[in-house]
Amino acid sequence: MDRLLMHACCAPCSSAVIDEYSKYFDITLYYYNPCITDEVEYYKRADELTRLGIIYNVPVVVANFYPEEYYSCCSSLSKEPEGGKRCAVCIHQRLEGAAKYAKEHGFRYFSTTLTISPYKDSAVINRIGTSVGGKSGIMYMPFDFGYLFPRSLELCKKYNLYQQDYCGCEYSKQT
């Protein structure tokens, strides 16, 4: 089975993806999200993802929390609407981090759970991922997990997963 590094934003978005795709790939979840509002929220989400990894027997790698990485590239875009240019820059940053980790740890493929969200544009995410993959030499798998969103809600209830009501950054929390 091929190894796939799956960038994971949170446990709810990862649940149905793991449930479905661990049949086809040897998945490792990579939690790298410098956009999260604060350290408490960052590690709360990381802990839930780790718990989900234990349930599914899927390894979870949690990157350290470095919000300055996010602010260095996105603070000038604070007035952008949710889903706009700021989000594209943020997604690019996270997928670059995942590609770098994938390359350093011998993965041939990487992807992201971000496309499961009905609030995100899968085409934009996959375009960014494909570009990042091309530059890094790691193949990006352009999935559109949107069809799994209802299943993720079922799994959130089943496993009592912490569900946040905003993407993660302070700007998405305000909308």
Image (tube, rainbow, N blue to C red):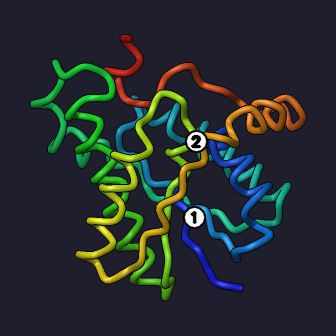
Q: Which residue is mark 2?
A: 116
| Picture disc at residue 89 | none
Q: Position of residue 22 (x, y in %)?
A: 76, 67
In the image, residue 10 lies at what x, y percent? Answer: 59, 42
Q: Residue at left 39%, top 47%? A: 123
Other-residue count near label 2 (Cα within 10 Å), few / some / many at <14 / 14–19 / ≥20: many
Would you say 155 lies left or right of 103 here?
A: right
Q: Quadrant of the C terminus?
A: top left
Residue that protrudes farthest toward the top in the picture: 175
The amino acid type found where label 2 is placed reads Ile
Relative to 141, 130 lies left or right? left
Report the residue marked by disc 1. 61
Quadrant of the image containing the N terminus: bottom right
Residue drawn 78% across the image and 38% down it: 151
Look at the picture and state if 89 lies above or below 100.
above
Location of residue 118 in the rendering, given as x and y in whole percent from the top left corner: 54, 30
Secondary structure at badge 2 equals: helix
Kindly identify the residue that appears in the image at 35 percent across and 39 percent down.
Answer: 35
3 relative position to 128: left or right: right
33 displayed left or right of 2 = left
Query: Residue 61: which quarter of the image?
Result: bottom right
Numbered-mark total: 2
Q: Position of residue 87 (x, y in %)?
A: 29, 36
Mark in front: 2 vs 1: 2
Q: 62 or 173: which is nearer to us?
A: 173
Name which of mark 2 and mark 1 comes first in the sequence: 1
What's the amino acid at mark 1? Answer: Val
